[in-house]
Amino acid sequence: MPSSTSPDQGDDLEACVLRFSDLDLKDTSLINPSSSIKAELDVSTKKKYSFAKKKAFALFVKTKELPAPPSEYKEKWWKCCQQLFTDQTSIHRHVATQHADEIYHETASVLKQLTVTSSTSKTLKPADKRNPFKEDLTHNHEVSAWLPDISCFSPDELISGQGNGEGEVLLYYCYCDLEDPDWICAWQTALCQHLHLTGKVRIATEGINGTVGGSKLATRLYVEVMLSCPLFKDYLCKDDFKTSKGGACCFPELRVGVFEEIVPMGISPSKISYKKPGIHLSPGEFHKEVEKFLCQANQEESDTILLDCRNFYESKIGRFQGCLAPDIRKFSYFPSYVDENLELFKEKRVLMYCTGGIRCERGSAYLKAKGVCKEVFQLKGGIHKYLEEFPAGFYKGKLFVFDERYALSFNSDIVSECSYCGAPWDQYKLCSTPQCRQLILTCPACQGQGFTACCVTCQDKGSRQAASPAQSSFKEECECTARRLRAPRELLQQGRLPASPEPRPGDDEDGPCLHERPHLPFPKPSQS
C-alpha cells in the first residue's frame, strides 16, 4: 500500500509525532509552502502536500490533548482557547475554523521534514518485516493505480440511472486491522469520484464503513474493486454488500474521512474491540429465535430480551415485535444505557439487531464485557438482510436509513403516528427551521395547517428568520431535544422486564428529534 510519508513507510500518528518531535507547532515564521518550499520538494513529496496538511492538523490537535477523567470511557479530552472539548468532532471543527493560519504554517514545516526524510525512509523498515498484503500494493504508490479501468464505458453509462429508483445504494462495513487509513481515505475518495458515487465512507485502523450511491454500473464496479483489494478480499464477500433502490441523488455530496471508530460508539477500540462480539445468527436463525420468543406465554418473564440497539427515531417507524427499543438519541449513548440498566440484562439471553449489523459488532462486545448476560447474539447483516429474506416476517414498519430517502419500505405496516393529530404516518421531514436538523412526523393535513416544526420554539424561530434571515450555523439539537435523557433507565416491576408494546397504528435516531404528542405544546389540529 502506498505510504503516507514515503513509498515504503506507513507511519501512524504516534510515529509521526516521534519523528517530528523537534517541530515547533507554534512557529509562525515559516514561509508560504506554495513558494520556495514547494520548489525544494521532489516530485514524490509534492504529491503528498494534501497528506502533509492532514498530518499538520492532527499534530496540532494532539498538542491540545488532556487525559479524560477516570469516570469517562473516552481516553482523552482536548483544551484550546480556554475551551474544553470532550469529543473529537468538536475539537476538529474548532481547529478548522479558528486556527487555519497555524495549520497553514505547520503544513510547511511538515513538508520540510518530509523533504529531509524521504531520501532515507526506505531504510527505516526491513523488507523481511513488511506486511504481505501491503507489499502487494507498494508496487504502485499512487491511488490511480488502484482504480478500475472505465475506458470501455462512456461517461453517460456511468452516470445514467443515478436517479432514485433507477440507480442503487450500497451499504457495507468491514472490520479488519488497517495500517494506513490515510492512504485508504485518499484511495476511496479517488475511487468514488472516478465512479461518480456520492455518500459517506468512514475509515479507521479497525476497518471501513460505507454507504455510497450511484448508477448500477458504478456500484457494481465499486463492489468488484473492494472484493479484489488485497486489504479486504479475505474479509469481505459479495453478500456483505446490502443494496437498495436509490442513486447518487440520495446523498448531497461525497464525504470520506479517517476516524477513531468506523461507527461512533464513543469508546476507544483499544478498550472495546470488534474482535470480541456476540454470536452471529443468520436471518433464518434469528427468525426462529424471535418466533420462539414471541410464542412464550409471558414475554415479560422470559429469559430472552430482543434488543434494538438503534436510536429512538429509527425504531419509532419500524421494529421487531416484542422488542426492547431504548429511548436513546445516538449510538454513543448506548454504553450509558447499558450501564444504567445492567440489572435488566442479568442472566438474560440477548438477541441484538440494528440496521446493517455494524452497531451490533461493538455493541454486543460492550454488553458481553459487562459479564452479566447469559448469552449475547446478534443479527448478521442486520434488519436489511433479514427483510430481504423475510419481508413479511416479524419486523413491522419501515427501515430508517441515514440518507435523503430516510426510510426503506419492505412491507405495508405503519407503526408510528403523526406527532400532531395522531393519524398513522411514518414519513419523516426535517423541521422547517433551517438551523434545526431534527426530524418530525407530520401528516399532509397537519402540514397544510402550518405544523412543520419540531416544537413551538422552532416554529417561532422559523417565523422570525423568514422575516429577517440570519446567518446559518451548525446546530444539531434544539431546546426540546436537550430535555431528552441521555440514557433512560427502564422501570422494572417485581423483577419483570418492561413491557414492549406490539407495533400497531397509534403507537408511538445520530441526530434527529422526534416528539410524542404529549410533549408538544401545539394545539391539536381540528379534524376535517
Image (cartoon, rainbow, N blue to C red):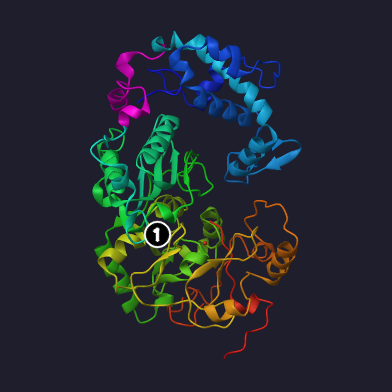
Q: Going by the image, does 420 lie left or right of 232?
A: right
Which residue is rendered at x = 38% and y = 44% of the image? 196
Residue 236 seen in the figure: no
**Is residue 324 among the parts visible in the rendering?**
yes
Q: Residue at x 34, y 42 (%)?
A: 195
Amino acid carrying label 1: it is: Thr
Give the quarter of the image for residue 469: bottom right
Q: Is residue 290 above or below residue 118?
A: below
Q: Residue at x 64, y 22 (%)?
A: 105
User: Left or right: where does residue 16 sit relative to residue 8?
Assistant: right
Q: Judge whether 240 appears above or below 422 on screen.
A: above
Rendered view: 331 above or below 224: below
Residue 60, percent across and down? 63, 28
Left or right placement of residue 79 versus residue 147 in this view: right
Q: Quadrant of the image for the C terminus? A: bottom right
Q: Nearer the viewer, residue 307 or 89?
A: 89
Q: Which residue is mark 1?
A: 355
Residue 185 lies within the magenta run: no
Q: Quadrant of residue 242?
A: bottom left
Farthest residue to the bottom: give it.
528
Say which of 520 and 449 sits in front: 449
Residue, far left: 152
The spot of residue 395 in percent (x, y) is: 36, 71
x and y, in percent, of residue 79 in the image: 70, 36
Q: In which quadrant will I find the N terminus?
A: top left
Q: Position of residue 234 (x, y in %)?
A: 25, 38
Q: Which residues are magenta?
A: 124-146
Q: Pick the residue in front: 410 or 468.
A: 468
Task: Residue at 52% x, 54% y: name it.
Answer: 335
Q: Secondary structure at mark 1?
A: loop
